[in-house]
Image (cartoon, helix red, strand yellow):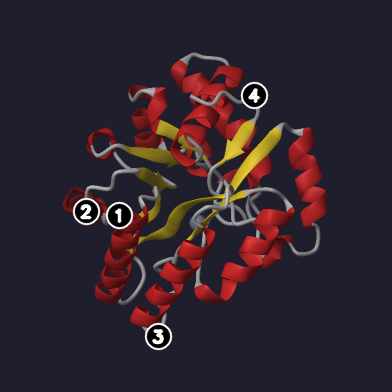
Amino acid sequence: MNLTNSFFDSHSHFDDCAFDEDRDAVFEQMKAANIKHMLIPGICQQRWQKQINIAHQYQCFYALGIHPWFIPDNIDAAITELAKLIELHQHQRLFVALGECGLDKLKPNFEQQRVLFERQLQLAQTFQLPVIIHCVKCHSEVINLLKHYSLSAGGVIHGFYGSVETAKQYQTLGFKLGIGGLLLNKNAKKLQKAVAELPLDLFLLETDSPSMTPQKYQPNRNSSLILPEIAAEIANLHKKTTVFIMKQLSGNAMQLFDP
Ligand SMILES: [Zn+2]
């Protein structure tokens, strides 16, 4: 395993326009807080180029994919474009995964979401890439699809919120769980239980910034700077030190994305 002595935010939309005004300053604050690795997931065709530019500028890992909130008018054409881009980037050291893609029961066009998701799972199979999955209120559908496609490089269920039983099903499929700011919310009992009961090699740290601001910091923009706090909460649940959690969970992310 690649050992690392710094924090790894496995899911940050650092390319989002919310950071356009002060991206350099946030990046400097991150370095000062020992947050030295970050993965920027893909969102939609229109964002890919900006995302790639920012990933290279700040030396962040990146993934390419289409989020279920951004269903393209022409799914076939978008998937063809995505496949071409992946082919072009597949040997870049910083390009490490497919995503984010997935299913969201709270958003419209579930059938189209499913088509878009399956096409991306097929691409992950073809290119043997780990997948970054967005899954809201449809764990059984996602688990069934992952069983069907059996992806050799695994992946992560980002922003995981579910029970111990659901977590174990993902574990069996070789998937990691991204643990973010939800863990800091007082009423996140189910998630706290899952994190406390399951082994640490299952988890990655993430923020999903600028979204998913923990309740106590709302309405402010979320950023990777809350990562040590999430690690401290996991440390508390596992009776370990925050440094131990940082090393283990950053190592998990390196193992998945940069083996
Ligand atoms: Zn995201």
SS category of the residue bearing label 2: helix
Verify CB contact (< 8 Å) between mark 4 and mark 1: no
> Given the image, on which type of amino acid does mark 4 rest?
Asn
Residue 23 located left or right of residue 209: right
Whichever of labels 3 and 1 marks the residue nearer the N terminus, that label is: 3
Q: CA distance from mark 4 to mark 3?
A: 44 Å
x%, y% of residue 35? Answer: 68, 36
Verify CB contact (< 8 Å) between mark 4 and mark 2: no
x%, y% of residue 250? Answer: 55, 31
Quadrant of the rendered image containing residue 28: top right
Q: CA distance from mark 4 to mark 2?
A: 35 Å
> Circle 1 is placed at which residue position?
125
Q: Residue at x 49, y 56 (%)?
A: 90
Is the distance from the Cβ of mark 2 to the nearest ligand 1 atom less than 8 Å? no
SS category of the residue bearing label 1: helix
Depth-wise, is mark 4 or mark 1 nearer the camera? 1
x%, y% of residue 247? Answer: 56, 23
> Circle 4 is placed at which residue position?
5
> Given the image, on which type of amino acid does mark 3 rest?
Asp
> Given the image, on which type of amino acid does mark 2 rest?
Tyr
Whichever of labels 4 and 3 marks the residue nearer the N terminus, that label is: 4
Q: Nearer the viewer, residue 240 or 48?
A: 48
> Circle 3 is placed at which residue position?
73
> Circle 2 is placed at which residue position?
149
Depth-wise, is mark 3 or mark 2 nearer the camera? 2
Q: Nearer the viewer, residue 88 or 176?
A: 88
Residue 213 located left or right of residue 134: right
> Given the image, on which type of amino acid does mark 1 rest?
Gln
Depth-wise, is mark 3 or mark 1 nearer the camera? 1
Whichever of labels 4 and 2 marks the residue nearer the N terminus, that label is: 4
